[in-house]
Amino acid sequence: MARARPVDTTEAPVGICYSGGTSSRWLVESILNGTIKRPENVAVFTADTGDEHEWTYDDIDAVEEKCKREGVPFVRCADPMQAWLDLYHGLRMDRRMVARRLG
């Protein structure tokens, strides 16, 4: 019988889906300002449909800038293959590090 082993969530990779709406912005900003404890390995992802309102793109730009200032990776997924390549190359070493810790 397989048993699940406990995972230290402070080390597990965490991806936050940011939609450009108020709820997901609250989550991102709460992590950036310390209201919610920031995971060690966190990145923010947004799907760019190319068909959003101008104010949505303004908001996404503002959140991306905040993430950059705080050292949190921000990934815009517009081209699925490019997003995967950016993520793979950017987080490859972090994944190996986390795998060793959890292994």
Image (spheres, grey):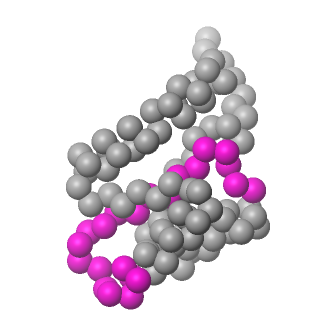
Question: What residue is rendered at 66% in x and 65% in y?
Answer: 32
Q: Nearer the viewer, residue 14 or 62?
A: 62
- Which quadrant of the figure has residue 5? top right
Which quarter shows the C terminus? top right
Q: Residue 54 appears at what percent x and percent y?
A: 32, 87
In this orientation, which residue lies closer to the viewer: 93 or 10?
93
* Front-lying residue, 31 or 7: 31
Residue at x 43% of width, y 75% of height: 61
Instruction: Examine the rendered structure and indicate whether residue 86 appears above or below residue 24.
Output: above
Residue closest to the far top: 1
Please provide percent x and percent y for residue 47. Answer: 34, 63
| Residue 52 shows up from this direction | yes
Task: Please tell me whether residue 23 belongs to the stretch shown in magenta.
Answer: no
On screen, 39 above or below 62?
Answer: above
Residue at the spot x=67%, y=49% of the render?
Answer: 39
Judge whether 61 appears above or below 80 on screen.
Answer: below
Task: From this view, report whether residue 16 is shown above or below residue 85.
Answer: below
Q: Quadrant of the N terminus?
A: top right
**In the rendered structure, which segment of residues is drawn in magenta?**
37-58
